[in-house]
Amino acid sequence: MNLVIVDYKAGNVQSVLFALERLGVQATLSSDFETIKAADKVIFPGVGEASSAMAQLRARNLDKLLPTLEQPFFGVCLGMQLLCEHSEEGDTGMLGIIPLPVKRFQTDLKVPHMGWNQLEKLQSPLFAGIAEGEYAYYVHSFYVPLSAYTIAQTSYPEPFSAALQYKNFYAAQFHPEKSGPAGSQIIKNFLAL
Amino acid sequence: MLTKRIIPCLDIKNGRTVKGVRFENIRDAGDPVELAKWYAEQGADELVFLDITATNEERKTFAELVRDIARHIDIPFTVGGGISAVADVEVLLMAGADKVSVNSTAIRNPQLVEDLACRFGSQCVTLAIDTKYTEATGWKVYARAGTVETEHATVDWARKVVELGAGEILLTSMNNDGTKAGFALDITKAVSEAVSVPVIASGGAGTMQHFADAFQIAHADAALAASLFHFRELDIPDLKRFLKGEGIAVRC
């Protein structure tokens, strides 16, 4: 399988590469239009701040390419938020692939939402073999509300989208590459789609 | 529900774990990667690695070690020790660390916290505070591995670094550290209530009840210990079962 990781200097690229390595899967790191377009599957990692990530994507013309992709695509953490329409983080226009907003947590609880929290209402082959209530690792201050495209949810304290699917675009707000054996299984499930 | 985190801390010198760790079932307990893998299997929620070496040459070794750790463990980890510039952090994050912990440098140069948060996001900036109480001064922040008293009152300093962009506070009470008499509940609670970001309680853990107190009385979001875990005076699965029985949300 020709698996490509989108390279736009996102912070957790190395962790995603290592997670794949632990599964015995080779991946190519690339920001090249043709290489990404030709991939069987694409993983889109991301940590950091929305507007600077968008600037990095625009600098590589990836803001034009990514919405046109048709192969299975997996956005992780900020990589999920970037697929949406708009983020309250820096009032940033995102890629606009999934017609959803990204909002800041308005809660008395601690922000960032940091640590292990439970995945609920799992409804996708992405979660094959994953039990309801399984724990995943989160670290984020912005979230995508529940929607018709939500395929898993987590509560902090209100439920929000733990994962999304829109056409060929899958996405997770948590970090599967840092979520122990369950996280590895979710990555494996994506590779098996 | 978001769970409370249990965090073993490993001191690293020249790429090896320091202190005679007693592990019968680990081939080489001085190997941080072996130890990290074991803790991940035991159910540790995160790990902290502190580089206690001094020279720049040795720090390069540490970056290689960070890469090796990231390659082998599938839970998040924070690295700290000797971070003085944005470039140091870039190397560690690109090697696969999830967060960095900054301590003395932030006291000398608070601007670094803001620069790191801007560049990499608050979520990967943990601000470590060493604090000590005396009757004359109250709780004060100490710099340089706890050797130098600063003018900062602890709660004020915590508020300030969060305003600058710290995404988490690692609060170590020097009065309690090594005593096994329990965490410093009063200052941990005061800091936790003063800031909007998660707080890790550190220093003084000796029993399972101490962890419960850190979460229930001091409202800490996570609790850190070193020798207690390294010497296997307390095993993480037992600790988590106890906490669960006390009605505390933990991952187990």
Image (spheres, coloured by chain):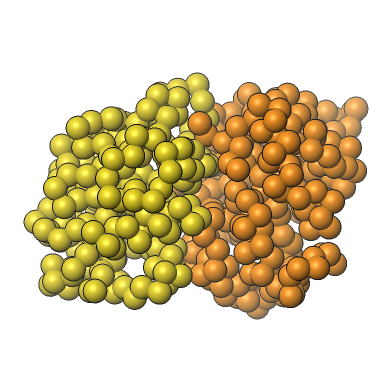
Q: Is residue B118 left or right of residue B168?
A: left
Q: How many numbered circles does the render carry?
A: 0
Residue drawn at point x = 26 percent, y = 36 percent: A150
- Give the camera-side residue of A155 and A68: A155
Image-based side of B131 in relation to A7, left or right: right
Q: Is residue B152 visible?
A: no
Residue B18, image quadrant: bottom right
Residue B142's place in the image compared with B97, above or below, is: above
Indicate the position of residue A70 as horizontal and vertical percent values: 11, 58
Residue B201: image location, x then y, percent: 71, 38
Q: Nearer the viewer, residue B48 or A26?
A: A26
Residue occupying image coordinates x 13% and y 67%: A37
- Colour representing chain B: orange
Q: Residue at x 39, y 51 (%)?
A: A129
Side (left or right) of A72 relative to A126: left
State which quarter of the image contains the C terminus of chain B. top right
Q: On screen, B26 above or below A187?
A: below
Residue B246, horizontal then vertical, whole percent: 71, 28
Task: Using the image as rendered, state which of residue A51 and residue A180 is in the foreground.
Answer: A180
Regarding residue B230, the answer to whether it shows in the image is: yes
Hey, which quadrant is residue A158 in on the image?
A: top left
Q: Position of residue B76 (x, y in %)?
A: 54, 54
Quadrant of residue A20 within the rendered picture: bottom left
Picture colour for chain A: yellow
